[in-house]
Each structure stands twice: as structure tokens, then as C-alpha cells.
Amino acid sequence: MIDEQQLRKIVESVVASVATASGGGLPKATSGAIAPSTPTSSKHAAPSLAAGIRGNEGVFVRMEDAINASKRAFEEFSHFGIRERERLIGILRRVTLDYAEEFSRMACEETGMGNVRDKILKNRNCAKNSPGTEDLVSRSWSGERGVCLEEFAPFGIIGSITPATHPVPTMLNNAIIMLAGGNTVVFNPHPGAKRVTAHALQTYHRAIVAGGFPENLITCVENPSIETANILFNHPDVKLLSITGGPGVVKAAMATNKKVIAAGPGNPPVLVDETANIEKAAEDIIKGASFDNNLLCIAEKEVFVVESVFDRFMMAMEKAGAVKIDDIHMNLLVEKAFIKSEKGGHVLNRELVGKSAEYLGDLVKVNVPEGTRIIFGETTKDSLFVQEEQMMPVIPIVRVRNFDEGLQRCLEAEHDYHHTAIIHSKDMDRITKFARVMNTTIVVANGYSTQGDGPDDGEAYLAFTIATPTGEGVTSPRNFCRIRRLAIAESLRFV
Ligand code: NAD
């Protein structure tokens, strides 16, 4: 006879051995279309070391194994039609809405950048507004000589590099728009965000498999590095690269022989002219620039204000809750934010990227009340805060004589990134001129930056990969597809 205590011990040992076999982490889903309905915020499970050749819920030790698994997954996935892909995307959206808080907390903890409140919004916005298969509208023509049909076909395996600034939303957005096109994706996450990325990927992976889809539609490596990125860049089975990051990685990817969709850095300037609604301009700039402590590549980074409304604008910023600092403290902040390099130049101090306004104020001994979203101050056009992408909630304000000088300064500060620019003006001719001359992928007029990328704020779909140097713009599923044509000669015609 087994007594109750012995029975409990047997059950405990069986449970422990099952947990080990499944590689730890979150409990494996067993049934249902969408598995993880209960976010487990207490379990920030890093990928297990069991992520060997077979991987652990999409996470692999070796990049080559992640790519091989993705190849098998692509073959299986090719049997799933558009409607099934849309169901799959629905699963990814649901999981993100369920886990937005957990992913956001983990991302803040691991990267030390941004704030949980905005990251939750960012995840939710991404889940709701990343475009799905509806973007893949085929075209057809008919004429005397027959019928022609053009449809979107997958590339195959896509290699995706994701940034530390928005690790999970970029992975999610990429997964949605790439899987919509029938592709599979191998991620090389930023090393500084590898744990949250792997954890989120495993959470998605479990739900995908529980929903009846193949394993390894999305994969990543446990310890991403430049070396693993290079394997991805040069592997013959990887057909397309999607790069979201700074200038270094964009340059490295564009030096490969592969097709690259590159979303590079930006330094979005803002122009405020004398016709603008000054109070609203100040509020919009604070709203856009403060989001997630100014981590977004589209966020307002420096502001040029026409002289005749300069003082009014500075007062409006204070009234809207931003904290003004004098030029001595602004210069002190610049010194902390940019470290002198051995070659005589300067490099961005990554320790300060995405830190809060309060934290930055403390650093230069300025009293910044709790809850302050933005610090601002007057600078010259040559300040490093103006000319370099700094990703901190600090806004340098530069005085300009008129609209034309402001436009010229914006152009210089944007450095031909062709990324984003913002204007506040009621003069339609000036807005048109600004958009033409700036020639950026996104121009926002009389609003805040995120109104240019996501329908929660604006009128357009959302992407976390805004392909600036390669020109695809705010990416969507069709950018990750090949266009194939079927021409049927002299048939399927009524007349
Ligand atoms: P980062 O350039 O430091 O890193 C991005 C990724 O590239 C990481 O995964 C990193 O490991 C990898 N990497 C870096 N150098 C590499 C090299 N030589 N070879 C291979 N891989 C390399 O960028 P970050 O700090 O994580 O992100 C912020 C940057 O990304 C900012 O410049 C921002 O503007 C840009 N960004 C652009 C977009 C866009 O849509 N255009 C979106 C988000 C971020």
C-alpha cells in the first residue's frame, strides 16, 4: 500500500522531470487555439540551456540550427493559406495583449531604457495595428489577349536584426508582417535585450504550436552577437535581411550580397514657425519626445523655432510641464551624454539612452520634479544634442530668423537619413515646401511624431521597421514578398 506522503513524493518527482524535459520556462500549453491566456509575470524565464540543436521553443544555441529549423518550418508553412496565416497573426496579437505588461517590465529591467507605462502602450499598439494579410491585395487585368494576375509570394527565410530600444514590439511587428507573407523569420536580437526577446519568442512559439501551426516559424539564438549576425547575413538559405538599428549594423548588412530592407537611424527635427498654434506645438512636442523617454527613432529630437515666437514657445513648454534648464546645465548634460573617443571625436554614452528626465536632472544637479516628462533648454545649432541622435528626454531648442533658415537647419540636422521630420505651421505652402525639401520617409504636420506611424494616434498603419536607406518606407507585409505574375493567353475572356 502506498500512503499519501509517498504518493505526493511520486507526483512531485514526475512533475519535476516533466518540467526539466520541457526546458523550464513557462508551463507548456496543452490545448486550445490560443494557449497562454494567463500571463505569469513572476516568471521571467530566460531561455534554458537546453536550447540545443532541436531548440527550445524556438530558441537555439547555434545560429545554423535556428536557420535549419526555420527552413523546415517554411516548407511546412507553405501548406497554410492566407486565412490560416491571418488566424496565426490573431494568436500573436492576443498573446501580446495578454503579456504586454510582463514583456514591458522585463524589457525595462534588462535594457535599463524607457519606462514600463509607455512600453505597455507600445506593445499594445503594435499588437493591434501591425498590418496583416489584408495588405496583400493582388492585381489582375484582362484584355483582348488574355488575363494577367499578380500575387504576393514569400521570399522564404528572413533574417531579422532587432534593436535594444524596442525589442519585443520590433520582433512582434516583424513576425506579423513577415508571416503574413508566408515567410519564416530568424531573429538575431540585440545582445542587451536577449533575455526578454527569447522569453517573448518562447511565449509566442508555444501559442503558435498550440494553435496547430508548425514549430520554429519564428526562431532566435540564445546568445546573439555580431558573429551570429554574420552567420545570418551570409547563410545561403536566408533570402532576405531586415535590419532595424543604428548606422553600424545597417552598413554591415548592406555590404552583404543579399537583398536588405534596412531601417536605419534618424534625428527628427521639428520646425515651429510664427503661424503655428504655439501652445499646441509645445504640448505635441512634449508628448512625442517624451514617449518611452525618447527612444523612438521617429520621436522629436531637436526643435527650431522662429525668433518672433521663440519666447512664447519657451513659456508654453514650461506651462505644458517641461522643465527648462540654462545653458550651463545643458552643456553639462551634453558632456555627460557624449563621451570623448580616442580618435578625437565623441560617442553617445549608451548608459544614458532612454533614462528618465528626473534621472538626467539629478546627474547635473538640477531639480526635476517627479513625473516630469521632458527637460529642455536653448542651445546653438551646433550642439551635439542637436546634431546627434541622443534618444533622451532632453530637447534642445534653437532660435532661427525665419521659416527658410529653420528649414535649412532642419535639413542639416536630419543628415540625409531620410527618416522623419515634423512641422508646426498654419501655412499650407510652407508645409508643402517643408515636406518636399526634407524628403524624409515620414513628415508630420501639426501633430506629434507617433501620429505618423500608427492608427492609435494617427491615420496610418504601424511599423517598427521604417525602411529609410533602402526606401520601402513604413514597412508592411507586401515589402517582404516577391511579386509573381501569371499570364493566361487568350483564355478566361468573355469577349
Ligand atoms: P544598434 O545599432 O546598437 O543595434 C541594432 C542591432 O544591430 C543589434 O541587434 C546589434 O547587436 C546589431 N549590430 C550592431 N552592429 C552590428 C554589426 N556591425 N554587425 C552585425 N550586427 C550588428 O541599435 P540600438 O541601439 O539597438 O537601436 C537604436 C537605433 O536603431 C537608433 O539609431 C534608432 O534610430 C534605430 N532604429 C531605427 C528604426 C527604424 O525603423 N528606422 C526603428 C528602431 C530603431
Image (cartoon, rainbow, N blue to C red):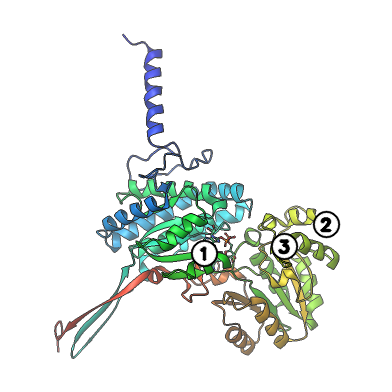
Query: Residue 232, position in %: x, y?
Result: 43, 59
Q: Residue at x 36, y 16 (%)?
A: 7
The residue tagged 2 is 366
Measured Cα–Cα span from mark 2 to mark 1: 35 Å
Q: Quadrant of residue 285?
A: bottom right
Q: Residues within 10 Å of mark 1 (few under 14, many from 20)?
A: many
Three-letter amino acid code at the position of disc 3: Glu
The residue tagged 1 is 244
Query: Residue 93, position in %: x, y?
Result: 43, 55
Query: Element under label 1?
Result: strand
- Give the mark nearer the N terminus: 2 vs 3: 3
Q: Is residue 160 above or below residue 146?
A: above
Q: Residues within 10 Å of mark 2 (few under 14, many from 20)?
A: some
Q: Residue at x 48, y 58 (%)?
A: 229
- Give the mark nearer the N terminus: 2 vs 1: 1
Q: Nearer the viewer, residue 226 or 181?
A: 226
Query: Element under label 3?
Result: loop
The quadrant of the picture showing ligand 1 is bottom right
Name the quadrant of the N terminus.
top left
Name the quadrant of the C terminus.
bottom left
In front: label 3 or label 1: 3
The residue tagged 3 is 342
Three-letter amino acid code at the position of disc 1: Thr
- Give the mark nearer the N terminus: 3 vs 1: 1
